[in-house]
Image: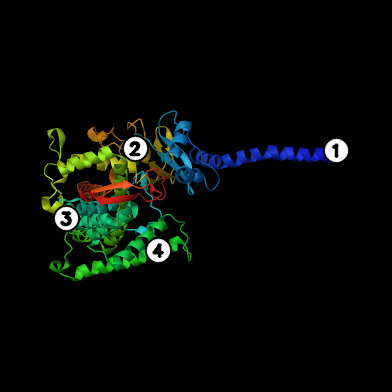
Amino acid sequence: MHAQGVAEWAWWIGLLLGAVPLLALAVWHCNDAAHCAAFALRRRRRGARLPPGHMGLPFVGESLALLWHFKLARRPDGFIDAKRRRYDGEGVGVYRTHLFGSPTVLVCSPAANKFVLHSSSQDGAAFGIRWPAPELVGFSCVVNVDGAQHARLRGFILAAINRPSSLRAVAEAVQPRVVAALRAWADKGTITAATEIKKVTFENICKMFVSMDPSPLTEMIDGWFAGLVAGFRAFPLDLPGTAYRHARACRRKLDAVFRDELQRRKETTPLDLNVDGDLMSGLMQMEEEQGEKLSDDEVVDNIVSLVVAGYESTSNAIMWAAYHLAKSPHALRKLRVRTLLFLPFGMEENAAIGRDKNGGFITLDDIPGMKYTAKVVEETIRVANVAPMVHRVAHKDIEYRGYTIPKGWRVVVWLRSLHTDANYYDDPLSFNPDRWDKPPKPGTYQVFGGGPRICAGNMLARLQLTIMLHHLAVGYKWELLNPDAKVTYLPHSKPVDGAAMSFIKLNSE
């Protein structure tokens, strides 16, 4: 009797052990099978097929795998590299997956990226924008509209921030604050670069966009923007205590501040405003040939969206420039020599820019001659990958290289994979400004996106980087306190210690 009981238990245990792998296999494939079946039923055309890939687990898809590569393994390219190795026999660079609640197609080749990014922005476009929680950034902002409305708004913004008079005013306005910040850092002796650079970048953005100098109000605005950005990354659950509810409250406060400033400008004569060249005045003054101007909603929403888009990304890029130069003494020495005019071999690069010219400030006219600085800027934004991906949504079923991207699916353009691919860049993870002696291969440099939605503020970001690099190279020396510190990649890439460094004046040694 006892032996029979043992045998029954052994049978049940064996059945259980055999069933668990089968159950796990069924769970693993059921999500993929369900989406493939739904696609097959909807698309009865012979030969239609989804891109290769796998949809992962039910509900969560492959989100956990993506987070594992970014947060735990600290190998952000590992997720896409695994798909390349497994599925990319044809070299198309298009894969299906399921991320953060949405069936998704990843694209990561120059041709596929161009296909998505260069989709026309006019009505009927194949791909549209998908911004998380669009109500937080504003329904009237350029990132939330399509077609003719997008083209109109983008034209206003480009005219306001990229015209030479605006860039000239920016170069003049931001440098006193940059110089003062660098002196304060040197007085401290040691700084956390990520924190200090973020502070001065935000102060400069307040000056450039709405002519606000540092004050208790700008400190509150900084906090409100931090709360707003946190809301983009949170589940949109509008309940007390949630990040999304807090983000909506922050947006209302920002809205009130900027609308008050807008009204003040309307009621004040131009001679009394003292806001020449800032973004708000530029957007208020721009008008179409028919005489139509932007509405108040459009001005405020685009101020908010441009701060969100440019604030963290610009400060992050400047931090990485200082970080990589500290770890690349040859590049830093070359930048300093070129900038200070101690040029070997009779070179005349940057010859117009001296230590005492314009009180040590550079002008917009100087920048085209700063050849090596420009190479450092481009290499920094390539290696930093501050915007590793952009998001779109398919407005209709779209055919690409024999595959169908279904209507309603999210499309993630994986930009960073181009910039870290050894097929396109020699030793791609190394910091080497001299690689820019030659132009990159066509389609392999997409740090600001591409097509009709390429980042409108890319020239402004490059200008701020150039100004900071000039003043760093002219007068300061810095060394990382933890050169081997690990890097965290979410929500933005940075060393875990915030790039802590010693910071002194060059002539104080």
- The Cα–Cα distance between marks 2 and 1, rounded to whole angstroms, is 66 Å
Amino acid carrying mark 2 in the image: His
Q: Which residue is mark 4?
A: 248
Among the two numbered marks 2 and 1 on one chain, the one whose residue lies closer to the N terminus: 1
Residue pictured at 40% horizontal, 34% vertical: 93
The x and y percentages for residue 55 are 51, 41
Classify mark 2: helix, strand or loop.
Answer: helix
Q: In this orientation, which residue lies closer to the viewer: 245 or 145? A: 245
Q: Which residue is mark 1?
A: 3
Classify mark 1: helix, strand or loop.
Answer: helix
Nearest-to-viewer mark from 3 and 2: 3
Question: Dot 4 surroundings within 10 Å: few (below 14), some, or many (20 or more)?
Answer: many
Q: Which residue is mark 3?
A: 172
Question: Farthest front residue?
Answer: 509
Amino acid carrying mark 1 in the image: Ala
Amino acid carrying mark 3 in the image: Glu
Left or right side of 39 for 456: left
For residue 446, above or below residue 501? above
Among the two numbered marks 3 and 2 on one chain, the one whose residue lies closer to the N terminus: 3
Which numbered disc covers residue 419?
2
- The Cα–Cα distance between marks 3 and 2, rounded to whole angstroms, is 33 Å
Colouring: rainbow
The x and y percentages for residue 384 are 33, 43
The answer to whether the residue labelled 3 contacts the one labelled 1, judged by CB atoms less than 8 Å apart, is no
